[in-house]
Image: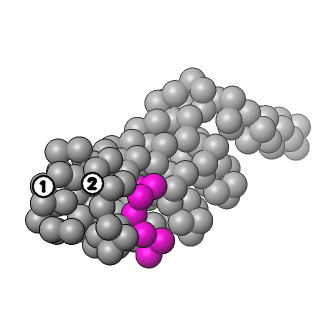
Amino acid sequence: QDRSLVLTAVRRHGMALRSASTELHDDREVALAAVQQEGTALQFVSRRLLKDKEVVLAAVRQAGWALRFAAPELRKDKDVVLAAVQQSGWVLGDASSCMRDDPEILAAARQQSELALRVSAVSAQDMEVASDSDEIQ
């Protein structure tokens, strides 16, 4: 496939990456252009690029729910998760469990979306219990 033609296509419509060759799914410039235009195009990038923090950050800033396609190690990266929940609070459920307990992540998710309250309900209850036990002592 003609790389320059695909690059032009994904800059206009990120999901065009789906039709590109496997080789171009692993091309960082092509993948970055695609996810900057349409974050959910992250599902079509190579496994190697699913671990690339810059590519994943660009995707989740455009479409928070692209977090579900990120490599597991980036679903527990605070910068990535924070960017995702600031865009779509309900994606908190796609973050690593250690991120769902982070107060800054919880606050950002709740500010963005009421649905995030349901996803974080257990964490919120745990925080209330801890707060209550502090008051008793």
Which residue is depicted at the point 56% across and 69% down? 73
Judged from the image, the secondary structure of the residue bearing numbered disc 2 is helix
How far, Cα to Cα, is label 2 from label 1?
Answer: 10 Å
Q: Amino acid at mark 2?
A: Ala
Mark 1: few, some, or many residues within 10 Å (few <14, many ≥20)? some
- Residue furthest to the front in view is 1
Residue beneath the point at 83% across and 38% down: 129
Q: Which residue is mark 2?
A: 34
Give the residue drawn at x 50%, y 51%. Answer: 67
Stretch in magenta? 42-48
Give percent across and percent down for residue 7.
16, 60
Q: Which quadrant, please, contains the N terminus?
A: bottom left
Q: Earlier in the sequence, mark 2 or mark 1?
A: 1
Q: Locate residue 99 relative to residue 89 in the image: left or right.
A: right
> Is 45 one of the magenta-colored residues?
yes
Amino acid tagged 1: Thr
Q: Residue at x 36, y 54 (%)?
A: 18
Q: In the rendered image, which quarter is residue 121 located in?
A: top right
The x and y percentages for residue 63 are: 39, 42
Of tags 2 and 1, which is closer to the observer?
Answer: 1
Q: Is residue 14 left or right of residue 120?
A: left
Residue 8 bears which disc, if any? Answer: 1
Quadrant housing residue 137: top right
